[in-house]
Amino acid sequence: MIFSMKKIATLTAAMAFAASLMSGTASAAPMPVVPHPWDQRVKCQTDDPEGRHIVTRYGNSELGWYHFTGRHNIKKCSTLYAALHGRVDRDDHHGHLEYDGVVFETGVPRHGR
């Protein structure tokens, strides 16, 4: 299966963004006020190799699981676990961690933009 560099780059960016959202800490910068209600329930949870407990909340259309499924077409927690079970790719040493991952769609290739 052949993937365009644009699609791989887009998926990599989406996974890095998703992982960075799930690495929240108490010392992180405050989130901006969003117009949609925030659903605090936990959808997915896992531990990274260093033992950090990471949760993904349902959130809203701008952040969290609802954002992933709508905007980035991530439908399974296992997609997020793949990135989170690797090493930390970026650490600002102030509580913001980013994990990179690449997602490949299996099955029939889809064409379109």
Image (cartoon, rainbow, N blue to C red):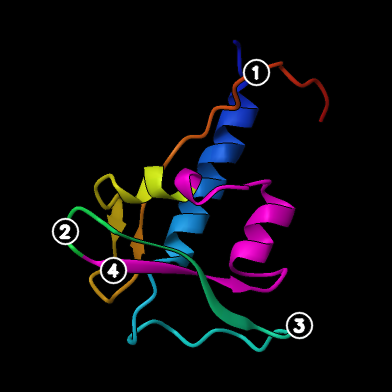
Answer with left or right where residue 56 lies relative to residue 93: right
Label 3 crowd (10 A; few <14 / some 14-19 / many >=20): few
Contact flag, marks 4 and 3 (Cβ < 8 Å): no
Q: Nearer the viewer, residue 64 or 91?
A: 64
Q: Residue at x 39, y 74 (%)?
A: 24
The answer to whether 50 appears left or right of 92 in the picture is left
Q: Which mark is residue 36?
A: 3
Alpha carbons under labels 1 and 2: distance apart = 34 Å
Residue 79 vs 94, above or below: the answer is above
Label at residue 50: 2
Three-letter residue code for mark 3: His
| CB contact under 8 Å: marks 3 and 1 | no
Q: Nearer the viewer, residue 60 or 78?
A: 78
Secondary element type, mark 4: strand
At x 56% / y 30%, what residue is drawn? 8
Which residue ends up furthest to the right in the rendered image? Answer: 112
Q: Secondary structure at mark 3?
A: loop
Q: For the residues carrying marks 4 and 2, which lies nearer the camera in this image?
A: 4
Q: Nearer the viewer, mark 4 or mark 3?
A: 4
Residue type at mark 1 is Gly
Mark 1 highlights which residue?
Answer: 107
Identify the image quadrant of the N terminus.
Answer: top right
Report the span colored magenta: 52-79
| Residue positioned 62% across, 47% down in the render | 74
The residue that disc 4 covers is 53
